[in-house]
Image: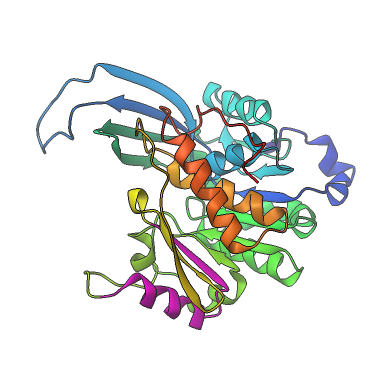
Amino acid sequence: MTAYKKDDISEGWVSKISVDVVVLGSINMDLVLKTERNPYPGETINSDNFEIHPGGKGNNQAVALGKLGASVLMLGCVGRDDYGRKLVQNLRSNGVNADYILEVDDSTGIAFINVFNGQNTIILYKGANGCCTVDAMSPYVDIIKGAKILLTQLEIPYETVKWALKIAHDNGVMTVLNPAPARILDDDIWPYVDVLVPNEIECKGILGLDGDDVTYEAIIRELIGRAVKNVVITLGAEGCIYNSGDTIMRQRAMATKVVDTTGAGDAFIGGLVFALSKGRSIDEAVLMGTRVAGIKIGFMGAQDYVIDPSGLI
């Protein structure tokens, strides 16, 4: 494994890095097909559009932060391949510090995405993202300790996520977890999560719930009872529901013509975390996330949106 700025590691410069937000997460290349509908099992259908876009939840969220002008650094892994090199270049072109992304022997992660009627289905190949082990990330522990916020997801090894959240929490760094893809989370992870941002499916999956007999408010209160400070459940076109202290609040989505929802949740999280990094309240952060997501869904691809941060915060 080698970092894109490996000299800094050997010379001890890592401890001198200071950024507002560290994003620890997945870095993928998205292969996107656009169809009129999803195919049935055993069926072949045609697509009239194929595009390649940078993706991965961690990558998308870091780029959203970079587009907003945040001081943001990405930690993660890519392969020694053309996709990996292009993804690192793309992060840098969007204002993200990509110097400590590791280049590994596995191939860069891939997401196969089918977009139909403004919605999407996704199949992931984790590839190099699976190399984001605790051992691989431990040389960068001082970068995490020196940040204002750590933002992470579940597209990299779970033990690495738990390790990073604890390191950040124990050093006074605000932690934001996007629990995607959903899985049941261990009880000992909750005290290390300041802000939890699942969607309407993930909020049930992380607690091992199924069916429609539980309300979002009940889920939020259950998670608060487990020591999570703020829970923001994104609901797609319905906006989101969250807690502001002990009060359950709703935020409507922006009225926007939908082109592609791929990466909308990541754009929301980028906006939310950017506002939090500027010391804004959870209410202001949720509104910021809503505005950024509303802009994103007017564009094709998870990252190919244009945003003017002035006036958003």
Task: Answer with the quarter of the image where residue 204 lies.
Answer: bottom left
- Looking at the image, can residue 269 be seen? no
Q: How is the structure coloured here?
A: rainbow
In the displayed image of the protein, which residue is found farthest to the bottom?
225
Foreground of the two, 78 or 166: 166
Image position of 84 with respect to 167: above or below: above
Q: Which residues are magenta?
A: 214-234
Q: Residue at x 83, y 47 (%)?
A: 17
Q: Residue at x 45, y 47 (%)?
A: 265
Foreground of the two, 81 or 116: 116
Horizontally, is 52 left or right of 121 in the view? right
Horizontally, is 178 left or right of 125 in the view? right
Image position of 90 with respect to 63: above or below: above
- Looking at the image, can residue 188 be seen? yes
Image position of 59 with respect to 91: above or below: below
Horizontally, is 25 left or right of 73 in the view? left
The picture places residue 210, in percent across and down from the top left corner, at: 25, 69
Foreground of the two, 173 or 230: 230
Q: Residue at x 55, y 45 (%)?
A: 58
Q: Residue at x 68, y 29 (%)?
A: 92
The quadrant of the image that shows the N terminus is top right
Task: Answer with the quarter of the image where residue 298 lies.
Answer: top left
Magenta span has 218? Answer: yes
Foreground of the two, 162 or 128: 162
The picture places residue 124, in percent across and down from the top left corner, at: 37, 41
- The mark tally for this picture is 0
Magenta span has 202? Answer: no
The picture places residue 304, in percent across and down from the top left corner, at: 50, 27
